[in-house]
Image (tube, helix red, strand yellow):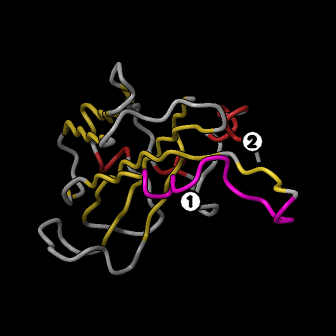
């Protein structure tokens, strides 16, 4: 599985078949990479969740997740007789940033999230960096302190680079 050779195909991956990300979030957003490919920033300007966050059930609050991860290609290893990653231990090279819980509202809001790798991303053959955005909704008020107990949400890979 050589995803580094076809990273554009990864941006079609939705992690919720019933509620695809593009059907839930109907507001433009921006993804920016730092020069050294160490930091990714997600910007959502003038967001009105009441009209731009389309969830089939009533919700009172939402939060956004920004995930950056380094993904190795998987290749067949003749010696082991199995598939394995081209670069080992990349699963530890994942960073997740969560926004605060926000109330469902018709007031415009600017949301910005940043996630950074401890070191610049490995830009070597057989690897890719993916950026995923997730939206989680809750029937609880926005001032809750617990994570969403119901787990309603959606996520999509929105950007990649090699």
Circle 1 residue: 19
Above or below for 142 versus 67: below
- Which of the two residues, 82 or 152, is positioned nearer the viewer here? 82
Circle 2 crowding by C-alpha within 10 Å: few under 14, some 14–19, many from 20: some
Tell me the quarter of the image containing the C terminus.
Answer: top right
In which quadrant of the rendered view does residue 81 lie?
bottom right
In which quadrant of the rendered view does residue 26 lie?
top left
Q: Residue at x 68, y 45 (%)?
A: 73
Q: Residue at x 29, y 33 (%)?
A: 43
Left or right relative to 141: residue 130:
right
Q: Which residues lie in the magenta part?
A: 79-93
> Does 24 lie within the magenta span?
no
In which quadrant of the rendered view does residue 77 lie?
bottom right
Give the alpha-carbon distance from disc 1 to disc 2, as whole Å: 27 Å
- Residue at the outermost front position: 79
Q: Residue at x 30, y 48 (%)?
A: 49
- Which of the two residues, 129 or 56, is positioned nearer the viewer here? 129
- Residue at the outermost top position: 35
Left or right relative to 162: residue 65:
left
Circle 2 residue: 2
């Amino acid at each position: 599985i050589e995803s580094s050779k076809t990273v554009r195909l990864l941006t079609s991956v939705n992690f919720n078949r019933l509620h695809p990300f593009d059907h839930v979030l109907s507001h433009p957003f921006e993804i920016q990479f730092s020069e050294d490919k160490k930091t990714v920033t997600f910007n959502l300007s003038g967001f009105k969740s009441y009209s731009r966050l389309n969830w089939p059930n009533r919700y009172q609050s939402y939060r956004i997740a920004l995930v950056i991860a380094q993904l190795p290609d998987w290749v067949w290893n003749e010696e082991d007789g199995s598939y394995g990653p081209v670069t080992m231990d990349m699963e530890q090279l994942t960073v997740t940033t969560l926004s605060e819980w926000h109330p469902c509202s018709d007031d415009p809001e600017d949301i910005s999230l940043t996630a950074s790798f401890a070191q610049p991303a490995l830009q070597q053959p057989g690897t890719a960096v993916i950026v995923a955005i997730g939206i989680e909704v809750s029937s609880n008020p926005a001032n809750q302190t617990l994570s969403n107990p119901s787990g309603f949400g959606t996520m999509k890979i929105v950007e990649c680079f090699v």
